[in-house]
């Protein structure tokens, strides 16, 4: 009778798993060496030396039972060792594949974050279409074509109309006003001090709203 497909997905291999397998391998190798030492002590019986003399009788210079047991255990342990080495190889492969996949995921996440940050960059809401020579705007470094993304406290999220900018200018007369514009794809920050000069207004530039 089927259990309804309750098979669980394979657990992710960890470095601790690999270390445990290596400990098992070292233990098996130690056991194999111990059994070889037993054979060495039995007149160097080894794995292939005959256990009977030339007349076919059990050799009297060795403990035949002990030699047979050692040989049997060595063969079993060598099979276990071979299977364990295959497990270790597969575990290492899974571990490295997991690391590669995690690296790919990390790169994808970083790329996604960068894309989100780029997409979250506020779009410009106004543009400078004229700058008068010698004006405060000209002195601050503003240029024709600059697209405004921040004008004091005004930004794309709260900008409604040009009156917002006019209010900020009037309140900031004689004080540094932080302005951020997009110029040639880069964000440029300037400090502009609205003040009286020989021309019209407090800025000496004309700002027009951008139609989104």
Image (tube, helix red, strand yellow):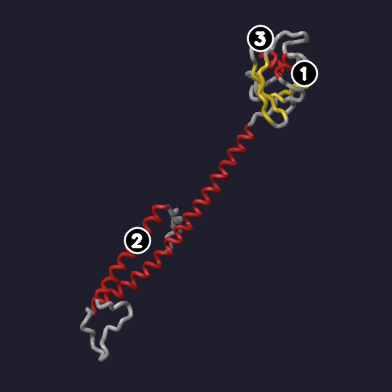
Crowd rating for badge 1 (residues with CA inside 10 Å; few <14, some 14–19, many 20+):
many
Location of residue 201 with respect to 79 vertically, above or below:
above
Q: Name the residue located 70 percent from the left edge and 10 percent from the top edge.
A: 195
Residue at image mark 3 = 174
Q: Residue 131 bears which disc, if any?
A: 1
Crowd rating for badge 2 (residues with CA inside 10 Å; few <14, some 14–19, many 20+):
some
- Quadrant including the C terminus: top right
33 displayed left or right of 143? left
What element does badge 1 sit on? strand
Q: Position of residue 108 (x, y in %)?
A: 57, 45
120, 69: nearer the viewer: 69
Number of callouts: 3
Q: Name the residue located 51 percent from the left edge and 48 percent from the top edge.
A: 102
Residue furthest out toward the bottom: 55
Q: Residue 24 bears which disc, if any?
A: 2
- Quadrant including the N terminus: bottom left
Q: Position of residue 206 (x, y in %)?
A: 76, 17
């Amino acid at each position: 009778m089927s259990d309804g497909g309750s098979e669980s997905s394979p657990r992710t291999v960890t470095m601790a798993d690999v270390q445990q397998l290596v400990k098992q391998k070292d233990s098996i190798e130690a056991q194999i060496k111990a059994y070889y030492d037993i054979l060495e002590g039995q007149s160097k019986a080894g794995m292939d030396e005959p256990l009977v003399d030339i007349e076919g009788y059990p050799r009297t210079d060795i403990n035949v039972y002990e030699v047979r047991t050692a040989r049997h255990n060595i063969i079993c342990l060598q099979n276990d060792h071979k299977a364990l080495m295959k497990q270790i190889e597969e575990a290492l492969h899974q571990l490295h594949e997991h690391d590669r996949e995690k690296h790919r995921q990390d790169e994808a996440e970083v790329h996604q974050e960068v894309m989100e940050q780029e997409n979250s960059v506020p779009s410009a809401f106004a543009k400078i279409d004229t700058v008068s020579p010698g004006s405060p705007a000209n002195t601050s470094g503003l240029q024709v074509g600059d697209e405004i993304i921040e004008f004091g406290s005004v930004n794309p999220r709260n900008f409604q109309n040009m009156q917002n900018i006019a209010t900020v200018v009037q309140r900031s007369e004689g004080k540094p006003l932080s302005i951020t514009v997009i110029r040639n794809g880069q964000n440029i920050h300037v400090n502009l001090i609205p003040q009286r000069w020989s021309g019209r207004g407090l800025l000496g530039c004309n700002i027009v709203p951008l139609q989104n």
